[in-house]
Image (cartoon, coloured by chain):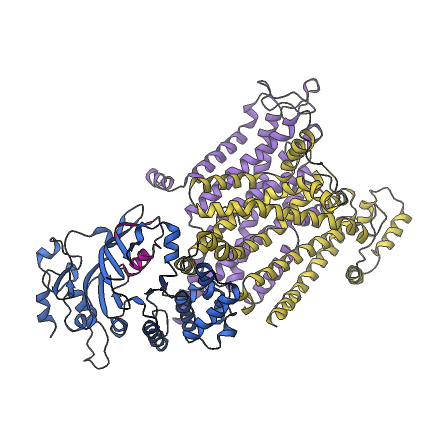
Amino acid sequence: MAIIEYILGRILQMVPVLIGVSLVAFLSIHLVPGDPVQIMMHGRATEEVLATVRGELGLDRPLPIQYLRFVGGAMVGDLGKSIIQKAPVDEIIGERLGPSLFLLVYSAVLAVVIALPLAVVAALKAEGPIDHGIRIVGIIGFAMPPFWVGLLLMVLFGLVLRWFPISGYGRTFIEHLWHLFLPSLTIAAFLAPILVQSLRSAMLDVMTADYIEVARAKGLSRRRIVLKHVLRNAAIPVITVLAVNIGWLLGGAVVVEYVFAFPGLGSLLVRAVGHRDYPVIQGLSLVFAVIVMVINLLADLSYMAIDRRVLRR
Amino acid sequence: MALLEVRGLCTEFRTPDAVIPANAGVSFNLDAGRTLGIVGESGSGKSVLCRALLGLIQSPPGFVTAGEIVFDGRDLRHLDETTLRRVRGTAIAMIFQNPMSGLNPVWPVGDQISEGLRVHRGLSPSAARARGIAMMRQVGIPSPEVRYDEYPHQWSGGMLQRAMIAMAMACEPKLLLADEPTTALDVTIQDQILALLVELQERTGMAMILVSHDMAVIAETSDHVAVMYAGRMVEVAPTAAAFRTPRHPYTLGLLQSIPRAAGDGRLTPIPGQPPNLARLGDGCPFADRCAVASPECRTRPVALREIDPGHWTACHFPERLAGLQA
Amino acid sequence: MTAIAIRDELARWPASLKIGATFFLLIVVTGLFAPWLTPYDPYTQDLAGFLQPPSWRHPFGTDHVGRDVLTRVLHGIRIDLQIGFITTYVPMTYGLLLGALSGYLGGWFDTLMMRLLDVAVAFPFLVLIIVIIAILGPGVHTIYIAVFLLAWTMYARLARAEMLVERGKDYVLAARTLGYPTSRVVFRHAMPNVINSSIVFSMADFVLNILLVSSLSFLGLGVPPPLPEWGAMVAEGRDFIFDAWWISTLPGLAIVVTGASLSLIGDGLAHRLGQRQRSFL
């Protein structure tokens, strides 16, 4: 029962954060210097049109009422209407949420697939030439701007070698994997170095623990010690690092989506900002915040699955 | 023939600044079913010796540079890693000082106890579980069926040390190395654990090396005692003889620094500090702290020699101790 | 500091710190002398000589309006390093102070601070900055405002954590039972750790901020053209990438070299300052 209590407590903790997040998203439109409706209409609308748009957006009511309507609407999935596309924001976002989540998960999986063996080798051969080599590659990978990597991969594998498509999403799962390979690899190239370094140092920490010496005294093989005793413990700090960096991962995804003209939330955001489509921007900032919060919740739950000591705190 | 014969074992740790000889020419025998107590201050090389016997010295910075470890007729130093691994945990097992950190926090205790059975004996998960529960019962862990699936943080230190013992005993070793097994525990628990070790030894007939800095622990449990100082053995004798007539001034010093309820309340600590191992001269390493040392003790090399039957000392002038003992 | 003290300090530097610092110094000096290093102007267009591949006259080639890419890359050092530096070290100063205070004081101040940090972390950094840009309009000033509003939170988090660790140590308890003022004890012991961990992190943050500025400029939301910002230059070359790879590739390479030298410094500093963590968090 401690488990259910823990999860409920963790979800309750999200409520004040959600209130803060919704306030920020709500207030953003009111912080625009000048008249946001004027700016949205690019200063070309008549006074009647402006008044209609204001009425549509509810901007003619007192602020607290507007906030309550905003939150009330958000809770049932109503985020208002896009100024540009004339469609409900929740529909526009809904269409693109799936592809974006697919891209995120795909990138994370690719990053782990790349990082895990490198981190294990680096930790087992710590301070040797292989470890230094992996660190230098990581330092370079970490400094590579995702938009640039994306562009180069697109040119090399998409245009010159023609191995992968350079845009689109595809229809089936296999097509998704194929279409999203280059964008995912781009994000993974940025994420993997962070993972390698954190997993390596976590493994080195764990390997000095008493219970590893006990495991050696038990006559376990090196392979079994690493797989059964080291990695599971080392995963705990790595999940923290991933959770802390999730903001950067999502940010990187925005840019990469834009580079590959990918039909996701990131490219939508860039376009909405270009058009000053405030309802879409508001809705997107809420959705992004919720994604981050859910990922952080998942990270906490996976701690619990790995290490039962969490429940005691 | 002895179960374990150690001859001239040398272990050193290499740092960029110095080479530290942690074991310098350690030799002893241990017969099957017997207990050897190894006593000495921290830093005297007791724990390093245990790890060297099992081939657990992390290299670098540690290196076993010389000597033989003949166990059951085989020199462990010349076994390849895979064969040595099979010896560890089956024929020779070890328990450690700190049970609180000795168990992996993310696995249930029971799985860790029976892990050796699955790896070395190839037992199925259910068979290993049954055997693990039986082991837990043998070492006095109450309601083992339930506690098998609990995690280390749910257990007390004394219970965890019992779990460590069950883990070590799972594959019925011929030799158990116990490195300060009671140091981290409450005084009341210490006696229980020692009694458990003695009982298990009687039941299984295994040999045991018990490392402690506490002469009282050694007196309770050991047939023979080996006193270590500065990485070498300075006195090896049957326990009773070592306590009645110590033939090395360091052993005498250790005995006189035991607090005794019935004594006159006077404690005599050994003066001075243990020597810096990286800067030992040719002479006796204890000379600087010794009450009966002569100038030549600082220069003349000293080695273990048998002065009574079965009683060995590394002192040039053991006869001088008679006057100090009154 | 005497010459001998400097020599002793240098002797203790790990190789990564020496290499990183050398590279970074070279980059800074190149940026300072950029106007005198090439015979071209970063803005003057030469429509007769556009899209020229790298040659002796134009080692990095020319772009679609005939500007010398090398000249623009060298001038870009000034823009990217300046923005990167300001966006890293201004928030670091007050983030450190607020975090250390929060960890030391505890109570309502700490609770409030934790809630603020929670909300800030809930938003992906780049998304929140893009939203702020949507409100205030694109440009360098908007980037400064957005980063100053947000970036201090990482430092506050670090400083608070170090402070909490230090507060829980035995000597603090000892000082308290003896009736000594704990503030002095705690701050004297904690501050070196608080500052060191932040300095190591700041090198990674510096890299991330350069990536941030160039990403925003690439999206057209940051430094406006025709300023020779590296990300903006990559964006300008994007349409010609197939025929003129150098316009986008070489400014991006400048980001990689700069970022890698900063990361190397961070890696070496972590060693030198005895920090457990390596260059990035």
C185 to the left or right of B239: right
- Residue drawn at (28%, 66%) of the image: B32
Considering depth in this image, is B213 or C14 the residue closer to the camera?
A: B213
Q: Which chain is purple?
A: C
The image position of residue A286, as x and y in percent, is 72, 55
Which sits in the foreground, A169 or A136?
A: A169
- Determine the colour of chain B: blue
Image spot of residue C238 (x, y percent): 69, 31
- In the image: residue A232, left or right of residue B25: right
In the picture, measured across the screen, residue B3 lies left or right of residue C20, that is: left
Which image quadrant is residue C240 in?
Answer: top right
Q: Is residue B306 above or below residue B243?
A: above
Residue A242 lies, in percent from the top left, at 58, 52
The answer to whether residue C132 is seen in the rendering is no
Relative height, residue A6 to residue A246 (above, below): below
The residue sitting at 59% across, 19% down in the picture is C55
Q: Residue at x 51, y 34 (%)?
A: C28
- Give the extent of the magenta segment: B39-67
What hue does chain A carry in this figure? yellow
